[in-house]
Amino acid sequence: MDIKRCFVKFVQFNDRTIQMIINQTVKFSTVYEFNDLNEQNVIVGFPSKSHTFIDKLKNYFSDANKRENVISKIKESVLCNDENIPKCGEVRQYCQTIASLLRNPTWDGFEKIYWSTIVEHISYIETGIFCLSGADVFKDDAAQLMFAHYANNLRGLALVYTRDVNTKLPTTIEYKGRQVVCMEENDYVELIKGKCFDFFCCKSKNWKYENEYRFFSTPGLQTASSIGLTLKGLFYTDRFDSEAEAPKLKLLRSINEKYYENPLFIERLIRSYQEEKFLVYKQENSKPKKYDVLEYLEQLS
């Protein structure tokens, strides 16, 4: 297996994950679901010639469901309820003002700063993001951190995908903090369509251990094959299934047999006592064998 085409998704083991494996789907999330508040960093000015753009925004809000969704997201964006926090009351009132104006859309009294806030939240609502780590996350203990953070304290799974050679590369995340994005007039239209991705491709250097890549599309479930990914197998740790009959492992093996005809690898990871990283642990010819994770993946067809 070409390691450069290999990606990893760390997940909890629950009904949603089971259905993802069975149906061979992936979920495109919005930044509202992410654990980094700084992901909500779309900060826009307004184009000098904004009439056409505002007409498109008004058309967007002709859909009552979309309008209510934007209102709810703007009101939820007030992260504090403590009146002692400076300007908390002002922020809450600002959001309430926008909500009131949207519910009575005569469009009178709409200032450009209101439109800017609205554009930010529409972009979050309309942009779907599927996050993965590159296989190099297994070079050191970064994979242990990912298992701990995203896979229920190492009780979940690491799903391993390969990318088809003929499909578009995912976007590599740059770890250089929040960036200023220069926008042309057409970019504003793309932003409210969920198709302007520059704001979602940079993170703080403190997240660098994640070795993250991103696919972009509309939010929701899609087949993995639609973005050129194929599930090749999964890793679990000693914490995954400690029950005597190993029901979780039995379920995964049953899914592998019934829905995949057994091509998926299902392997246990153990910690190395020489280095701070995982090793693949296997029984071969009744003897225990240990493999470096990247070497194990490279040997797969």
Image (cartoon, grey):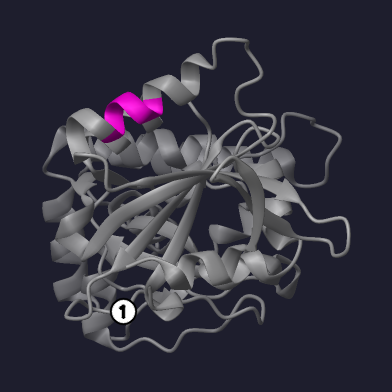
Residue of label 1: 169
Q: Is residue 192 left or right of residue 39?
A: left
User: Under tag 1, what secondary structure?
Assistant: loop
Q: Is residue 300 left or right of residue 167?
A: right
Give the residue displayed 25% in from the left and 85% down from the top: 185
In depth, the one of 77 and 52 nearer the eye is: 77
* Three-letter code for the amino acid on which mark 1 is drawn: Leu
Q: The N terminus is located in which quarter?
A: bottom left
In depth, the one of 26 and 275 nearer the eye is: 275
Give the residue displayed 11% in from the left and 43% down from the top: 62
Give the residue displayed 11% in from the left and 54% down from the top: 59
Image quadrant where residue 228 sits:
bottom left
Q: Position of residue 27 (x, y in %)?
A: 32, 45
Magenta stretch encompasses residue 255: yes
Q: Main secondary structure of the magenta part?
A: helix
Residue range of the region highlighted in magenta in the rendering = 252-256
Give the residue displayed 63% in from the left and 59% down from the top: 38
In depth, the one of 97 and 10 nearer the eye is: 10
Image quadrant where residue 221 sits:
top left
Magenta stretch encompasses residue 172: no
Vertical order, 176 against 224 (above or below): below
